Image: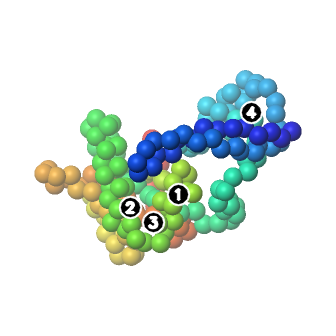
Amino acid sequence: MAGTIPLRLFTPSASNLAFSTTSVRVTLTHFRTPSILTRASRLSSNSMSQPAATHLNAAVTTNDAPEQPENADVVVQYVVLRRDLIDTWPLGSVVTQGCHASVSAVWSNKDDHQTVDYCSPDKIDSMHKVTLEVKGETQIKNLSEKLTSGGIIHKLWIEQPENIPTCLATKPYPKSIVSSYFKKLKLCK
């Protein structure tokens, strides 16, 4: 079954704000009514930024970039937080530290080809991050030294004015290049 759906798109321009109507051709490849199982699977999405598979599978014809082959080496950013701070600081404060390190690592390497690829318009909504934890300050400093000696570019975030190393984040790298540095660490839960 195929159909055309008119969409109203908001397109701001330099001098005015306008709405335009664009048609998108949609081919329905599988349609069934939602069951309890499909509702549950939508709630257990693996990605917080992308919805889980829905009860409607559709092939949409647009100018989207082609999907990467399954065996492609995914570009990932690692973020490592300190467990001792997670247990003693407000959660929002620790998350903010991770955000600082992540943005700093990306911005400091904004011209790097892997960072440009990671932040490209066709991939911006499907970034891959792995958030891990270490026990405390000694471990985060040791990890930073290990990454530095291995040539892995990263940002060790040091909260000021307290001068406390709180977390670190790598610049985006292909997973095959950096995963070995983090294999002994636990996922942050």
Find residue 55 and name its label.
4
Question: How many residues crowd around disc 4 within 10 Å: few (fewer than 14), some, or many (20 or more)?
Answer: some
x, y percentage for residue 75?
53, 63
Gap between marks 3 and 1, in whole Å? 12 Å
Question: Residue at horizontal 70%, vertical 35%?
Answer: 54
What residue is shown with label 3? 115
Contact, CB < 8 Å: mark 3 with mark 2?
A: yes
What residue is shown with label 1? 121
Regarding mark 2 in the picture, which secondary structure is present there? helix
Regarding mark 4 in the picture, which secondary structure is present there? loop
Contact, CB < 8 Å: mark 3 with mark 4?
A: no
What residue is shown with label 2? 106
Q: Can residue 180 be seen in this view?
A: no
Residue sitting at the far front? 15
x, y percentage for residue 36?
73, 23
What is the count of numbered marks?
4
Question: How many residues crowd around disc 2 within 10 Å: few (fewer than 14), some, or many (20 or more)?
Answer: many
Decide: is 186 above or below 10. Answer: below
Q: Along the horizontal axis of the image, is 139 left or right of 75? A: left
Q: Residue 27 sits in which quadrant?
A: top right
